[in-house]
Image (cartoon, helix red, strand yellow):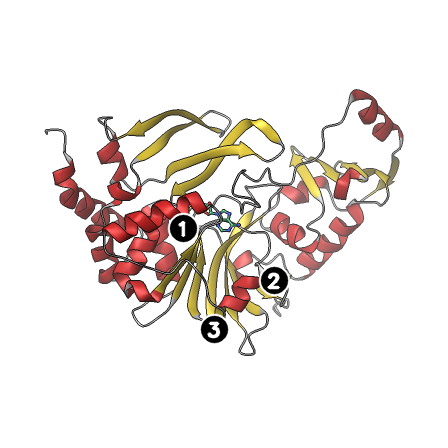
Amino acid sequence: MNQPTIDDWPSLADAMASEVRRAACLRNDALFQAFAAIPRHLFVPTYYRTETNADGWDSVTGIVDESHPDWLTTVYSNTALVTQLKPIEGQPSSETYTSSSSMPTVMADMIEELGIRPGMKVLEIGTGTGYNAAILCHLLGDDAVTTLDIDEELVDLARERLASLDYHPSFEPQDGTYDRILATHSVDDIPAEWLRWGKPGAVILTDLRSPANSSMGAWAKVAIGRDGSGAVGALMPARGYFMGARRTPEFAHAGDTTPEFTDDEHRTRANAMETRPTKVPASVLETGDFGLYLWRQAPEIRWFASSGTASLNGPRAESWAYVTEDSVHYGGLEDLWSPVERAYSAWEGAGRPGISTWLIRVDKSGKATIDLPPRRGR
Ligand SMILES: C[S@@+](CC[C@H](N)C(=O)[O-])C[C@H]1O[C@@H](n2cnc3c(N)ncnc32)[C@H](O)[C@@H]1O
């Protein structure tokens, strides 16, 4: 087959829309039509080619633009495409992904999960390329869509691209306005302003993810209370991972990392440990959904668990612990394994429930906590 040209974009978009319909099990024909109608190539004039190594780490291997033979077909494939890199906060010589065009099936899945339909006002947090905003404008009409991004450079580009299709969504959210809010970056709690921007009863869908451990997270779908303060809802296994919220437009957020220690500091910490037995082995941190529950119960504890042992650090690394199958070695301000034992006893007492049965409550400041379901009678 000949190499497709820009003029072939409608048939490429149509094929991608069919793939999205199949892969995301779309029932919503209007959403299929939106993917077929919007020229994704206008929103992704360049992207970074990435590769995943054997340890699961991604790295950038080149930049692809319209002069590259793969550009057009990749843009019309069901793939997430990295579109921006920035230095990591506090590590000026490093760079990581700060924006992308999300995977089309994940975009479709979020829109379906939120039951977005004409007549609703929708706020998208994380404009990025503007492609998802264009899909929303096609579905709802541009006066029903607001989109925002922390990065004004991205907002300006997206505004231009959307205007070239005669879409003019708002970029300024208004209080009490939206029926649905969807976020395309992850958060560790729900930002309080999202609660303010939604109408009472509005539904928010976001990827709730630990800034210290990006493999730990879930999608949260919560409805804002009728009095407008706080929200309640459910968690579900993440059907797509999103990049973490940035704190500034200039930098990628480093996530919450544990400080590096010198050999001397390691020795001092190792010498200042007490030891006690435990009935809760370190391997519980590698078990099912318990890690996620513990993160919600004690978000300030950072841990790394592997092969039946775990190392833990408290806030600012003022407490530390090393745990095996039956003993806890701990030092610093507090015994960090005690909160883990308490959380484990609650989770086990509830019958080790999976995340889909948990209730998530968001207070008016946005802090999210989990209620486990009562244990079922036998
Ligand atoms: C996965 S990309 C968005 C994809 C986008 N919806 C599209 O269709 O191209 C995530 C976006 O979230 C934005 N972002 C990150 N932190 C943010 C924050 N605190 N507030 C608003 N936007 C943020 C990033 O700048 C980035 O553009």
Three-letter amino acid code at the position of disc 1? Thr
Label 1 Cα neighbours within 10 Å, binned few <14 / some 14-19 / many ≥20: many
Q: Give residue 158's position: percent from left, percent from top.
A: 35, 48
Q: Residue placed at 59% from the left, 69% from the top? A: 230
246 shown above or below 178: above
- Most extreme residue toward the bottom is 227
- The residue labelled by disc 2 is 366
Q: Residue placed at 55% from the left, 41% from the top? A: 214
Give how far apart the Cα atoms at labels 3 and 2 are. Answer: 15 Å
Task: Using the rendered image of the protein, determine whether residue 116 is visible from the camera's viewpoint.
Answer: no
Are the residues flagged by discs 3 and 2 in contact, CB closer than 8 Å? no
- The residue labelled by disc 1 is 127
Quarter assignment of residue 73: top left
Give how far apart the Cα atoms at labels 2 and 1 are. Answer: 22 Å
Give how far apart the Cα atoms at labels 1 and 3 are. Answer: 21 Å
Task: Using the rendered image of the protein, determine whether residue 294 is visible from the camera's viewpoint.
Answer: yes
Among numbered discs 3 and 2, the one appearing first in the sequence: 3
Task: Please identify, in this view, whether the residue under mark 2 or under mark 1 is nearer the observer.
Answer: 1
Q: Give residue 225's position: percent from left, percent from top.
A: 55, 74
Badge 2 marks a residue whose secondary structure is loop
Q: Is residue 100 left or right of residue 44?
A: right
Q: Nearer the viewer, residue 350 or 193?
A: 193
- Tell me: is circle 1 under 8 Å from ligand 1: yes
Q: Give residue 242's position: percent from left, percent from top.
A: 47, 46
- The residue labelled by disc 3 is 199
